[in-house]
Every structure is written in structure tokens, then in C-alpha cells.
Image (cartoon, rainbow, N blue to C red):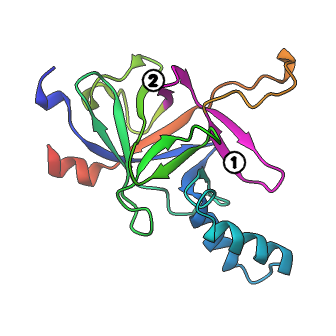
Amino acid sequence: MSDANNITFTGQLFADGLPLVLNYQVMEQRLKQPRITTGQRLSAEISLNDEISSPIVTLADHDDAEPLLLEFVPDYQGRYALNVKTAGRYFNWQLRLDQSTRHLLAAKSGGSYFELETYAGKLKSFGDLPSNPVSVALFSVEKKMRLFQHETKEGLTYFLYKNPNHTRQNTHNPSSVSFVLRSNPSLLSAVA
């Protein structure tokens, strides 16, 4: 594969019409709401300062929230490392799948590799994107599976590498999450 096909690009991911963000971004926005109970405020403050839950990738509460800007860095095997490029606390951190919580989160080092799958198959290079935006699945190279989506009773959505169905009943099995990738044309044109 030539270097021209291995272009680093930036983009945002969406699921269910909502942008992917880090949990701390959601908590910051919740604290700005004028009508928030003391319990909700305390819960948001705890999550905001928690080293474990703060960097977890989740969905924004509203569709007009600023999406997490990600840098997709290819290797020569059609795999991508995803780096956070949104300004703030986790700038330049890498996305990885946590071994203990199974969540997708931002980490200072030790990022995971993902393959991007579209309806046309696995994306080997930026030039293989069939459209912009495009529906994609994130396939964990390490875990050899797609990501699942799980919503908590507090309304936060997490992305896991393990099926969140603990009942073992097939009727409750979720399908893997389908993301929408919107690549950033302004940054791409500077690279091209």
C-alpha cells in the first residue's frame, strides 16, 4: 500500500443521531443547566472528577453538542489508532478498550487499534470511504469484535467490547453499534 493511501484524517462519530463525546464533556454541560437538583449536581461533580468515568466515551445529551474530534491514524495493515483532537483535558489521548470495565475510553497511552467497516467492507485507506458522511462499525483488532452500545439508568450510553446482555436470552441480544463517520473536509483538503 502506498503512503498516499495511508492518509491520517480527522472526523467525528455519531450514534443514534447524537455526537460521541467524553463523559466529562457531558458532566460539564449538565452542571451548566439552570434547573438541576442537588443530587444531580453532586453526581455530575463526582463523575467530572473521577479518573475512571471522566474519560469514558459516551453520547452527548443533545444533538447540538460539540462532537469529539478524532484523528484517525492508519498503520499499513488497514487498522486505525484514534486520537482525541478536541481541545481540553484529554487532547492527544488515545482511544482504547479498558480491560477491567470493557468501556471505550481515552487513555494517555496504550491505545487500541480499530478497523473501520462500511457496507462495502473493511476500510483499508481513506480513499476507500464511499461517501461523507458514511455509516461505519468499529471493529476491535485486539478483541476481534465490533462494539456494543449500553445505556445506564442515569441515561449515559457507553460503548463496550462485550455484549451487555447478561440474561443469556437471545431475544435480549443487542446488535453491534452502527456509527456515522463525518470526516472533516477542511482539514482533509489541507492534507491532499
Picture disc at residue 157 = 1
Residue 163 quadrant: top right
Picture disc at residue 118 = 2
Quadrant into which the N terminus falls:
top left
Which residue reaches farthest front? Answer: 100
Tell me the residue at 72%/53% (across/down).
156
* Marks 1 and 2, the one that precedes in the sequence: 2
Inter-mark Cα distance, 1 to 2: 22 Å
**Dots 1 and 2: beta carbons under 8 Å?**
no
Q: Is residue 39 left or right of residue 103?
A: right
Q: Secondary structure at mark 1?
A: strand
Amino acid, disc 1: Thr
* Numbered circles on residues, count: 2
Tell me the residue at 45%/23% (across/down).
118
Q: Is residue 1 left or right of residue 11?
A: left
Quadrant into which the C terminus falls:
top left
Q: Position of residue 108 (x, y in %)?
A: 40, 54
Q: Is residue 158 left or right of residue 115?
A: right
Q: Is residue 140 magenta?
A: yes
Q: Please rate how many residues cluster around mark 2, counting C-alpha atoms within 10 Å: few if below 14, some from 14 to 19, many from 20.
A: some
Picture disc at residue 75 = none
Q: Is residue 8 magenta?
A: no
Question: Bounds of the magenta span?
Answer: 136-160
Residue 151 quadrant: top right
